[in-house]
Image (cartoon, grey):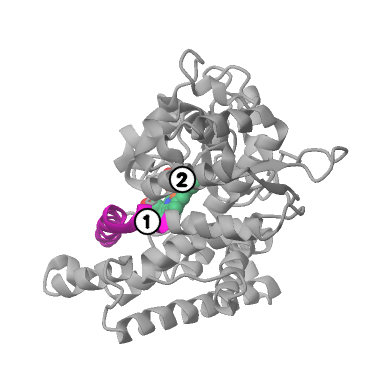
Amino acid sequence: MMELMHDHLPIQLTSLAQRYGSIYRLKCGNTTMVVLNSGELIREALVKKWSDFAGRPISYTGDIVSGGGQNISLGDYTEKWRAHRRLVHGALQRCCQQSLHGVIERQALHLREVLMGYHSSPVDLSEDFTVAASNVITTLAFGKEYDKSSLELQQLHSCLNEIVSLWGSSWISALDSFPLLRKFPNPVFARLLKEVARRDEIIKQHLDDYKLQGHKSEGSITGFLLQALDKHENSKEGKLLTDVHVHMATVDLLIGGTETLAAWLSWTVAFLLHRPEIQTKVYEELCTVPEGRYPKYSDRQRLPVLSALVNEVLRLRPVAPLAVPHRAIRNSSIAGFFIPKNAVIIPNLFGAHHDPAVWSEPYSFKPERFLEGGGGSTRALVPFGGGARLCLGESVAKMELFLFTAYLLRDFQFILPDSDVFPPDLRGIATVVLKIKPYKVIAHPRPPSGL
Ligand code: HEM
Protein backbone atom coordinates (compact mmCIF):
# COMPACT_ATOMS: atom_id res chain seq x y z
CA MET A 1 0.00 0.00 0.00
CA MET A 2 1.37 3.43 -0.78
CA GLU A 3 1.91 5.97 1.98
CA LEU A 4 -1.20 8.08 1.64
CA MET A 5 0.01 10.74 4.04
CA HIS A 6 3.16 11.41 2.10
CA ASP A 7 4.26 15.09 1.97
CA HIS A 8 4.17 15.01 -1.82
CA LEU A 9 1.19 12.74 -2.34
CA PRO A 10 -0.32 14.82 -5.19
CA ILE A 11 3.02 14.61 -7.04
CA GLN A 12 3.22 10.86 -6.41
CA LEU A 13 -0.31 10.28 -7.66
CA THR A 14 0.44 12.41 -10.72
CA SER A 15 3.55 10.41 -11.55
CA LEU A 16 1.58 7.15 -11.20
CA ALA A 17 -0.74 8.54 -13.91
CA GLN A 18 2.22 8.63 -16.30
CA ARG A 19 2.64 4.87 -15.76
CA TYR A 20 -0.96 3.67 -15.41
CA GLY A 21 -3.01 6.30 -17.28
CA SER A 22 -5.16 9.16 -16.06
CA ILE A 23 -7.60 6.90 -14.19
CA TYR A 24 -6.39 4.08 -11.93
CA ARG A 25 -7.40 2.19 -8.81
CA LEU A 26 -5.66 1.84 -5.45
CA LYS A 27 -6.54 -0.52 -2.64
CA CYS A 28 -6.40 0.86 0.90
CA GLY A 29 -7.51 -1.81 3.41
CA ASN A 30 -10.97 -2.84 2.20
CA THR A 31 -11.54 0.42 0.36
CA THR A 32 -11.23 0.83 -3.40
CA MET A 33 -9.93 4.26 -4.33
CA VAL A 34 -10.21 5.57 -7.87
CA VAL A 35 -7.80 8.40 -8.69
CA LEU A 36 -8.77 10.83 -11.48
CA ASN A 37 -5.85 12.76 -12.95
CA SER A 38 -7.29 14.79 -15.81
CA GLY A 39 -9.72 17.71 -16.00
CA GLU A 40 -11.92 15.76 -18.41
CA LEU A 41 -12.32 12.78 -16.07
CA ILE A 42 -12.82 15.02 -13.03
CA ARG A 43 -15.58 16.93 -14.84
CA GLU A 44 -17.21 13.68 -16.00
CA ALA A 45 -17.42 12.40 -12.41
CA LEU A 46 -18.06 15.60 -10.46
CA VAL A 47 -20.17 17.60 -12.92
CA LYS A 48 -21.75 15.33 -15.56
CA LYS A 49 -22.42 12.40 -13.21
CA TRP A 50 -22.59 14.50 -10.06
CA SER A 51 -25.54 12.59 -8.63
CA ASP A 52 -23.54 9.32 -8.73
CA PHE A 53 -20.48 10.75 -7.02
CA ALA A 54 -21.73 13.43 -4.59
CA GLY A 55 -21.26 11.26 -1.49
CA ARG A 56 -18.48 11.52 1.07
CA PRO A 57 -16.73 8.46 2.51
CA ILE A 58 -18.14 7.66 5.92
CA SER A 59 -15.32 7.36 8.41
CA TYR A 60 -15.03 6.97 12.14
CA THR A 61 -12.65 9.90 12.56
CA GLY A 62 -14.46 12.10 10.01
CA ASP A 63 -17.61 11.66 12.11
CA ILE A 64 -15.75 12.87 15.17
CA VAL A 65 -14.43 16.09 13.61
CA SER A 66 -17.74 16.83 11.88
CA GLY A 67 -20.09 16.44 14.87
CA GLY A 68 -21.42 13.16 13.51
CA GLY A 69 -21.34 14.15 9.82
CA GLN A 70 -23.38 17.30 10.47
CA ASN A 71 -21.10 19.69 8.64
CA ILE A 72 -21.11 20.48 4.93
CA SER A 73 -17.63 19.48 3.84
CA LEU A 74 -17.64 15.98 5.35
CA GLY A 75 -21.38 15.30 5.54
CA ASP A 76 -22.71 12.59 3.23
CA TYR A 77 -25.18 13.45 0.45
CA THR A 78 -28.58 13.26 2.18
CA GLU A 79 -31.76 15.34 2.16
CA LYS A 80 -30.61 17.03 5.37
CA TRP A 81 -27.18 17.80 3.89
CA ARG A 82 -28.80 19.33 0.79
CA ALA A 83 -31.01 21.56 2.97
CA HIS A 84 -27.95 22.57 5.02
CA ARG A 85 -25.81 23.43 2.00
CA ARG A 86 -28.71 25.34 0.38
CA LEU A 87 -29.24 27.37 3.53
CA VAL A 88 -25.57 28.29 3.96
CA HIS A 89 -25.13 28.96 0.24
CA GLY A 90 -28.09 31.37 0.33
CA ALA A 91 -26.72 33.16 3.41
CA LEU A 92 -23.26 33.42 1.85
CA GLN A 93 -24.67 34.81 -1.41
CA ARG A 94 -26.69 37.50 0.37
CA CYS A 95 -23.74 38.42 2.51
CA CYS A 96 -21.44 38.58 -0.53
CA GLN A 97 -23.82 40.90 -2.37
CA GLN A 98 -24.16 43.19 0.61
CA SER A 99 -20.74 43.41 2.18
CA LEU A 100 -17.99 41.12 0.85
CA HIS A 101 -16.16 43.69 -1.30
CA GLY A 102 -15.97 46.18 1.56
CA VAL A 103 -14.91 43.52 4.07
CA ILE A 104 -12.02 42.39 1.84
CA GLU A 105 -10.92 45.97 1.08
CA ARG A 106 -10.83 46.72 4.78
CA GLN A 107 -8.72 43.66 5.55
CA ALA A 108 -6.41 44.36 2.60
CA LEU A 109 -5.80 47.88 3.93
CA HIS A 110 -5.23 46.51 7.40
CA LEU A 111 -2.69 44.05 5.99
CA ARG A 112 -0.99 46.98 4.25
CA GLU A 113 -0.55 48.72 7.61
CA VAL A 114 0.92 45.57 9.16
CA LEU A 115 3.43 45.19 6.30
CA MET A 116 4.36 48.89 6.46
CA GLY A 117 5.12 48.32 10.14
CA TYR A 118 7.89 45.83 9.23
CA HIS A 119 9.90 48.70 7.66
CA SER A 120 11.42 46.50 4.94
CA SER A 121 12.84 43.93 7.35
CA PRO A 122 12.82 40.23 6.33
CA VAL A 123 9.73 38.50 7.73
CA ASP A 124 7.66 35.35 7.35
CA LEU A 125 4.25 36.69 6.26
CA SER A 126 2.28 33.46 6.58
CA GLU A 127 0.70 34.38 9.92
CA ASP A 128 -0.34 37.82 8.67
CA PHE A 129 -1.98 36.22 5.64
CA THR A 130 -3.82 33.79 7.93
CA VAL A 131 -5.09 36.64 10.14
CA ALA A 132 -6.30 38.59 7.08
CA ALA A 133 -8.10 35.56 5.60
CA SER A 134 -9.59 34.59 8.91
CA ASN A 135 -10.81 38.13 9.60
CA VAL A 136 -12.72 38.11 6.32
CA ILE A 137 -14.56 34.99 7.48
CA THR A 138 -15.14 36.08 11.10
CA THR A 139 -16.41 39.48 9.89
CA LEU A 140 -18.76 37.75 7.45
CA ALA A 141 -19.83 35.20 10.05
CA PHE A 142 -20.19 37.32 13.21
CA GLY A 143 -19.31 40.90 12.30
CA LYS A 144 -16.11 40.44 14.31
CA GLU A 145 -12.43 41.06 13.49
CA TYR A 146 -9.22 40.48 15.42
CA ASP A 147 -5.63 41.62 15.40
CA LYS A 148 -2.70 39.24 15.39
CA SER A 149 -2.06 39.58 19.12
CA SER A 150 -5.64 38.64 20.07
CA LEU A 151 -5.60 35.64 22.38
CA GLU A 152 -9.02 34.57 21.18
CA LEU A 153 -7.86 34.52 17.55
CA GLN A 154 -4.71 32.60 18.43
CA GLN A 155 -6.75 30.02 20.32
CA LEU A 156 -9.18 29.63 17.45
CA HIS A 157 -6.37 29.14 14.94
CA SER A 158 -4.22 26.88 16.99
CA CYS A 159 -7.19 24.63 17.55
CA LEU A 160 -8.41 24.59 13.91
CA ASN A 161 -4.85 24.00 12.66
CA GLU A 162 -4.32 21.22 15.14
CA ILE A 163 -7.55 19.53 14.06
CA VAL A 164 -6.64 19.68 10.36
CA SER A 165 -3.09 18.43 10.90
CA LEU A 166 -3.97 15.76 13.50
CA TRP A 167 -6.80 14.51 11.33
CA GLY A 168 -4.38 14.21 8.41
CA SER A 169 -1.86 12.17 10.45
CA SER A 170 -1.39 8.44 9.87
CA TRP A 171 -2.06 7.80 13.60
CA ILE A 172 -5.60 8.92 13.00
CA SER A 173 -6.25 7.53 9.50
CA ALA A 174 -5.12 4.10 10.75
CA LEU A 175 -8.20 4.13 13.02
CA ASP A 176 -10.43 4.30 9.93
CA SER A 177 -8.70 1.44 8.12
CA PHE A 178 -8.15 -0.83 11.15
CA PRO A 179 -11.08 -0.61 13.62
CA LEU A 180 -9.30 -2.93 16.08
CA LEU A 181 -6.82 -0.14 16.84
CA ARG A 182 -9.66 1.93 18.36
CA LYS A 183 -9.54 -0.31 21.42
CA PHE A 184 -5.96 0.74 22.26
CA PRO A 185 -4.85 4.02 23.86
CA ASN A 186 -3.84 6.51 21.18
CA PRO A 187 -2.40 9.83 22.45
CA VAL A 188 -2.83 11.52 19.06
CA PHE A 189 -6.50 10.60 18.97
CA ALA A 190 -6.93 11.86 22.55
CA ARG A 191 -5.46 15.19 21.47
CA LEU A 192 -7.81 15.34 18.48
CA LEU A 193 -10.82 14.81 20.76
CA LYS A 194 -9.57 17.54 23.09
CA GLU A 195 -9.11 20.01 20.22
CA VAL A 196 -12.55 19.25 18.77
CA ALA A 197 -14.08 19.95 22.20
CA ARG A 198 -12.09 23.21 22.45
CA ARG A 199 -13.21 24.25 18.95
CA ASP A 200 -16.84 23.60 19.82
CA GLU A 201 -16.54 25.60 23.02
CA ILE A 202 -15.06 28.63 21.18
CA ILE A 203 -17.68 28.59 18.39
CA LYS A 204 -20.51 28.08 20.88
CA GLN A 205 -19.31 31.09 22.84
CA HIS A 206 -19.38 33.18 19.64
CA LEU A 207 -22.88 32.08 18.77
CA ASP A 208 -24.13 32.67 22.33
CA ASP A 209 -22.60 36.18 22.32
CA TYR A 210 -24.17 36.81 18.95
CA LYS A 211 -27.62 35.78 20.15
CA LEU A 212 -27.22 37.90 23.30
CA GLN A 213 -26.60 40.98 21.14
CA GLY A 214 -30.05 40.30 19.66
CA HIS A 215 -28.80 39.83 16.08
CA LYS A 216 -27.19 43.28 16.08
CA SER A 217 -24.56 42.45 13.48
CA GLU A 218 -27.05 42.80 10.65
CA GLY A 219 -25.94 41.35 7.35
CA SER A 220 -23.73 38.64 8.86
CA ILE A 221 -23.96 35.00 7.79
CA THR A 222 -24.90 33.90 11.30
CA GLY A 223 -27.71 36.47 11.30
CA PHE A 224 -29.05 35.20 7.97
CA LEU A 225 -28.82 31.58 9.10
CA LEU A 226 -30.60 32.16 12.41
CA GLN A 227 -33.29 34.24 10.73
CA ALA A 228 -33.79 31.56 8.09
CA LEU A 229 -34.13 28.88 10.77
CA ASP A 230 -36.74 31.03 12.61
CA LYS A 231 -38.62 31.67 9.40
CA HIS A 232 -38.66 28.01 8.36
CA GLU A 233 -39.42 26.75 11.85
CA ASN A 234 -42.54 24.96 10.73
CA SER A 235 -41.39 23.97 7.26
CA LYS A 236 -39.77 20.65 6.35
CA GLU A 237 -36.41 22.40 6.05
CA GLY A 238 -36.78 24.07 9.44
CA LYS A 239 -37.46 20.72 11.06
CA LEU A 240 -34.37 19.18 9.51
CA LEU A 241 -31.96 21.91 10.59
CA THR A 242 -31.06 23.16 14.06
CA ASP A 243 -28.55 25.41 15.82
CA VAL A 244 -26.02 22.58 15.46
CA HIS A 245 -26.06 23.20 11.71
CA VAL A 246 -25.36 26.91 12.22
CA HIS A 247 -22.49 25.91 14.52
CA MET A 248 -21.03 23.41 12.05
CA ALA A 249 -21.43 25.81 9.09
CA THR A 250 -19.25 28.30 10.98
CA VAL A 251 -16.60 25.61 11.40
CA ASP A 252 -16.85 24.79 7.66
CA LEU A 253 -16.35 28.39 6.61
CA LEU A 254 -13.48 29.00 9.01
CA ILE A 255 -11.64 25.82 8.06
CA GLY A 256 -12.45 26.09 4.34
CA GLY A 257 -11.71 29.81 4.06
CA THR A 258 -8.63 30.50 6.15
CA GLU A 259 -5.67 28.23 5.42
CA THR A 260 -6.58 27.89 1.74
CA LEU A 261 -6.39 31.61 1.06
CA ALA A 262 -3.37 32.20 3.32
CA ALA A 263 -1.47 29.36 1.63
CA TRP A 264 -2.34 30.72 -1.81
CA LEU A 265 -1.01 34.21 -0.93
CA SER A 266 2.26 32.72 0.33
CA TRP A 267 2.59 30.72 -2.92
CA THR A 268 1.98 33.85 -5.01
CA VAL A 269 4.72 35.86 -3.31
CA ALA A 270 7.09 32.87 -3.57
CA PHE A 271 6.51 32.43 -7.32
CA LEU A 272 7.00 36.16 -7.86
CA LEU A 273 10.38 35.95 -6.11
CA HIS A 274 11.34 33.41 -8.77
CA ARG A 275 10.21 35.68 -11.62
CA PRO A 276 10.45 39.31 -10.40
CA GLU A 277 9.72 40.69 -13.89
CA ILE A 278 6.11 39.43 -13.57
CA GLN A 279 5.77 41.48 -10.40
CA THR A 280 6.86 44.58 -12.32
CA LYS A 281 4.34 43.86 -15.10
CA VAL A 282 1.47 43.51 -12.63
CA TYR A 283 2.55 46.71 -10.87
CA GLU A 284 2.70 48.62 -14.14
CA GLU A 285 -0.76 47.33 -15.00
CA LEU A 286 -2.10 48.38 -11.58
CA CYS A 287 -0.73 51.88 -12.22
CA THR A 288 -3.18 52.17 -15.14
CA VAL A 289 -6.22 52.09 -12.83
CA PRO A 290 -7.72 55.61 -13.13
CA GLU A 291 -7.01 58.27 -10.49
CA GLY A 292 -4.48 56.07 -8.72
CA ARG A 293 -7.27 54.31 -6.84
CA TYR A 294 -7.18 50.70 -5.73
CA PRO A 295 -8.84 48.38 -8.23
CA LYS A 296 -12.33 47.00 -7.71
CA TYR A 297 -13.21 43.41 -8.49
CA SER A 298 -15.20 44.75 -11.44
CA ASP A 299 -11.91 46.08 -12.91
CA ARG A 300 -10.62 42.56 -13.50
CA GLN A 301 -11.29 42.58 -17.28
CA ARG A 302 -8.97 45.53 -17.67
CA LEU A 303 -6.24 43.90 -15.56
CA PRO A 304 -5.38 40.79 -17.61
CA VAL A 305 -1.82 40.37 -16.26
CA LEU A 306 -3.04 40.31 -12.66
CA SER A 307 -5.84 37.89 -13.59
CA ALA A 308 -3.33 35.67 -15.41
CA LEU A 309 -1.12 35.62 -12.31
CA VAL A 310 -4.06 34.57 -10.10
CA ASN A 311 -4.98 31.77 -12.53
CA GLU A 312 -1.42 30.51 -12.94
CA VAL A 313 -0.87 30.21 -9.18
CA LEU A 314 -4.24 28.42 -8.89
CA ARG A 315 -3.10 26.07 -11.66
CA LEU A 316 0.35 25.27 -10.26
CA ARG A 317 -0.67 25.14 -6.61
CA PRO A 318 -4.35 24.29 -6.25
CA VAL A 319 -4.34 24.67 -2.48
CA ALA A 320 -6.77 21.77 -1.97
CA PRO A 321 -4.75 19.55 -4.34
CA LEU A 322 -6.83 16.38 -3.93
CA ALA A 323 -10.11 18.23 -3.22
CA VAL A 324 -12.04 16.28 -0.57
CA PRO A 325 -12.63 12.59 -1.33
CA HIS A 326 -16.00 11.74 -2.93
CA ARG A 327 -17.93 8.46 -2.59
CA ALA A 328 -19.88 6.65 -5.31
CA ILE A 329 -23.49 6.61 -4.10
CA ARG A 330 -24.41 3.87 -6.61
CA ASN A 331 -22.72 1.67 -9.21
CA SER A 332 -21.61 3.90 -12.06
CA SER A 333 -18.82 4.36 -14.60
CA ILE A 334 -16.07 6.84 -15.45
CA ALA A 335 -14.47 6.83 -18.92
CA GLY A 336 -16.28 3.53 -19.54
CA PHE A 337 -14.72 1.83 -16.46
CA PHE A 338 -17.10 0.25 -13.95
CA ILE A 339 -17.05 2.07 -10.57
CA PRO A 340 -18.69 0.12 -7.75
CA LYS A 341 -20.96 1.73 -5.14
CA ASN A 342 -18.95 3.05 -2.17
CA ALA A 343 -15.69 3.40 -4.13
CA VAL A 344 -13.79 6.47 -2.96
CA ILE A 345 -13.05 8.94 -5.75
CA ILE A 346 -9.93 11.11 -5.44
CA PRO A 347 -10.02 14.07 -7.84
CA ASN A 348 -6.32 14.83 -8.31
CA LEU A 349 -6.68 18.53 -9.13
CA PHE A 350 -2.90 18.95 -9.00
CA GLY A 351 -2.56 16.19 -11.62
CA ALA A 352 -5.21 17.77 -13.87
CA HIS A 353 -3.36 21.09 -13.70
CA HIS A 354 -0.07 19.45 -14.74
CA ASP A 355 -1.50 17.27 -17.52
CA PRO A 356 0.97 17.53 -20.44
CA ALA A 357 -1.89 16.80 -22.88
CA VAL A 358 -3.52 20.09 -21.86
CA TRP A 359 -0.70 22.39 -20.66
CA SER A 360 2.56 23.16 -22.40
CA GLU A 361 5.52 23.11 -19.99
CA PRO A 362 3.07 22.15 -17.21
CA TYR A 363 5.60 22.55 -14.36
CA SER A 364 6.76 26.06 -15.37
CA PHE A 365 5.39 29.23 -13.80
CA LYS A 366 4.14 31.11 -16.85
CA PRO A 367 1.21 33.46 -16.16
CA GLU A 368 1.55 34.62 -19.78
CA ARG A 369 -0.08 31.34 -20.88
CA PHE A 370 -3.40 32.91 -19.78
CA LEU A 371 -2.88 36.08 -21.82
CA GLU A 372 -4.27 36.41 -25.34
CA GLY A 373 -2.50 33.97 -27.67
CA GLY A 374 -0.75 32.23 -24.73
CA GLY A 375 -2.60 28.94 -25.31
CA GLY A 376 -3.84 28.41 -21.72
CA SER A 377 -7.57 28.23 -21.06
CA THR A 378 -9.18 28.98 -17.70
CA ARG A 379 -11.86 26.41 -18.67
CA ALA A 380 -9.27 23.67 -18.12
CA LEU A 381 -8.79 24.76 -14.49
CA VAL A 382 -10.59 22.89 -11.69
CA PRO A 383 -9.13 24.37 -8.46
CA PHE A 384 -12.54 24.49 -6.75
CA GLY A 385 -13.79 21.04 -7.82
CA GLY A 386 -17.24 21.04 -9.42
CA GLY A 387 -20.86 19.89 -9.35
CA ALA A 388 -22.84 19.30 -6.15
CA ARG A 389 -19.68 19.56 -4.05
CA LEU A 390 -18.19 22.63 -5.75
CA CYS A 391 -16.28 24.70 -3.17
CA LEU A 392 -18.95 26.59 -1.27
CA GLY A 393 -16.66 29.61 -0.95
CA GLU A 394 -15.65 29.82 -4.62
CA SER A 395 -17.00 33.34 -5.20
CA VAL A 396 -15.64 34.58 -1.86
CA ALA A 397 -12.24 33.06 -2.67
CA LYS A 398 -12.06 34.50 -6.21
CA MET A 399 -12.76 38.02 -5.00
CA GLU A 400 -10.24 37.63 -2.16
CA LEU A 401 -7.49 36.27 -4.43
CA PHE A 402 -7.91 39.15 -6.84
CA LEU A 403 -8.25 42.01 -4.34
CA PHE A 404 -5.60 40.92 -1.82
CA THR A 405 -3.08 40.38 -4.63
CA ALA A 406 -3.94 43.71 -6.23
CA TYR A 407 -3.57 45.65 -2.99
CA LEU A 408 -0.32 43.89 -2.05
CA LEU A 409 1.34 44.34 -5.43
CA ARG A 410 0.22 47.93 -5.82
CA ASP A 411 1.79 48.98 -2.53
CA PHE A 412 4.81 46.66 -2.15
CA GLN A 413 7.65 45.17 -4.06
CA PHE A 414 8.49 41.72 -2.67
CA ILE A 415 12.21 41.02 -2.67
CA LEU A 416 14.58 38.37 -1.29
CA PRO A 417 16.26 39.24 2.05
CA ASP A 418 19.70 39.10 0.44
CA SER A 419 21.15 38.68 -3.03
CA ASP A 420 22.80 35.41 -1.99
CA VAL A 421 19.56 33.93 -0.54
CA PHE A 422 17.87 31.36 -2.80
CA PRO A 423 14.23 32.00 -3.73
CA PRO A 424 11.80 29.82 -1.70
CA ASP A 425 11.60 26.07 -2.25
CA LEU A 426 8.52 25.55 -4.43
CA ARG A 427 7.91 21.85 -3.69
CA GLY A 428 5.57 22.41 -0.77
CA ILE A 429 4.00 20.12 1.80
CA ALA A 430 0.61 18.59 1.10
CA THR A 431 -1.70 17.59 3.88
CA VAL A 432 -5.31 18.61 3.27
CA VAL A 433 -3.97 21.99 2.18
CA LEU A 434 -0.92 22.34 -0.08
CA LYS A 435 1.39 24.75 1.75
CA ILE A 436 4.79 26.20 1.03
CA LYS A 437 7.63 25.69 3.52
CA PRO A 438 8.19 28.82 5.67
CA TYR A 439 10.36 31.52 4.07
CA LYS A 440 11.28 35.15 4.73
CA VAL A 441 10.73 38.04 2.37
CA ILE A 442 11.07 41.83 2.37
CA ALA A 443 7.89 43.78 1.60
CA HIS A 444 9.40 47.00 0.30
CA PRO A 445 6.89 49.88 0.05
CA ARG A 446 6.45 51.27 -3.48
CA PRO A 447 6.97 55.04 -3.74
CA PRO A 448 3.58 56.81 -3.71
CA SER A 449 4.71 58.88 -6.69
CA GLY A 450 4.68 55.73 -8.84
CA LEU A 451 0.93 56.13 -9.19
C1 HEM B 1 -14.67 22.57 -0.64
C2 HEM B 1 -10.96 24.65 -3.02
C3 HEM B 1 -11.60 28.74 -0.44
C4 HEM B 1 -15.39 26.71 1.81
C5 HEM B 1 -13.61 22.80 -1.47
C6 HEM B 1 -13.07 21.82 -2.40
C7 HEM B 1 -12.05 22.41 -3.07
C8 HEM B 1 -11.92 23.75 -2.57
C9 HEM B 1 -11.19 21.78 -4.15
C10 HEM B 1 -13.55 20.37 -2.52
C11 HEM B 1 -14.54 20.21 -3.64
C12 HEM B 1 -14.93 18.77 -3.79
O1 HEM B 1 -15.18 18.08 -2.81
O2 HEM B 1 -14.99 18.31 -4.94
C13 HEM B 1 -10.79 25.92 -2.48
C14 HEM B 1 -9.75 26.85 -2.90
C15 HEM B 1 -9.92 28.00 -2.17
C16 HEM B 1 -11.07 27.79 -1.30
C17 HEM B 1 -8.70 26.57 -3.98
C18 HEM B 1 -9.13 29.30 -2.17
C19 HEM B 1 -8.08 29.55 -2.91
C20 HEM B 1 -12.74 28.57 0.30
C21 HEM B 1 -13.37 29.62 1.07
C22 HEM B 1 -14.43 29.04 1.72
C23 HEM B 1 -14.47 27.63 1.35
C24 HEM B 1 -12.91 31.09 1.11
C25 HEM B 1 -15.43 29.67 2.65
C26 HEM B 1 -15.82 30.93 2.60
C27 HEM B 1 -15.50 25.42 1.36
C28 HEM B 1 -16.50 24.47 1.85
C29 HEM B 1 -16.30 23.27 1.13
C30 HEM B 1 -15.17 23.52 0.23
C31 HEM B 1 -17.54 24.72 2.93
C32 HEM B 1 -17.09 21.98 1.24
C33 HEM B 1 -18.14 21.90 0.11
C34 HEM B 1 -18.96 20.61 0.12
O3 HEM B 1 -18.51 19.58 0.59
O4 HEM B 1 -20.09 20.66 -0.38
N1 HEM B 1 -12.89 23.98 -1.61
N2 HEM B 1 -11.55 26.52 -1.52
N3 HEM B 1 -13.43 27.39 0.49
N4 HEM B 1 -14.72 24.81 0.39
FE1 HEM B 1 -13.23 25.71 -0.63
Front in this rendered view, residue 132 or 360: 132
Q: Ligand 1 closer than 8 Å to the CB at disc 1?
A: no
Left or right: 152 in relation to 378: right
User: Residue 184: x and y, percent?
Assistant: 67, 75
**Magenta range:** 80-104
Residue 102: assigned label: 1
Instruction: Tell whether label 1 touches label 2 (CB within 8 Å).
Output: no
Q: Position of residue 238 (x, y in %)?
A: 18, 70
The N terminus lies in quadrant: top right
Q: Label 2: state its secondary structure.
A: helix
Q: Determine which quarter of the picture holds residue 312.
A: top right
Q: Is residue 16 above or below residue 343?
A: above
Find residue 70 and report its image quarter.
bottom left
**SS majority, magenta:** helix
Q: Residue at x 50, y 70 (%)?
A: 64
In terms of image quadrants, where is residue 103? bottom left
Instruction: Work out whether residue 177 can be spotted.
Output: no
Q: Residue at x 65, y 25 (%)?
A: 364
Q: Residues within 10 Å of mark 2 (few under 14, many from 20)?
A: many
In the depicted view, which residue is nearer to us: 22 or 396? 396
For marks 2 and 1 on the same chain, the one whose residue lies earlier in the sequence: 1
Please name the residue that numbered disc 2 is placed on.
Answer: 403
Q: Amino acid at mark 1?
A: Gly
x, y percent for residue 278 = 62, 29
Using the image, determine if residue 371 lies above or below residue 149: above
- Residue 71 visible? The answer is yes
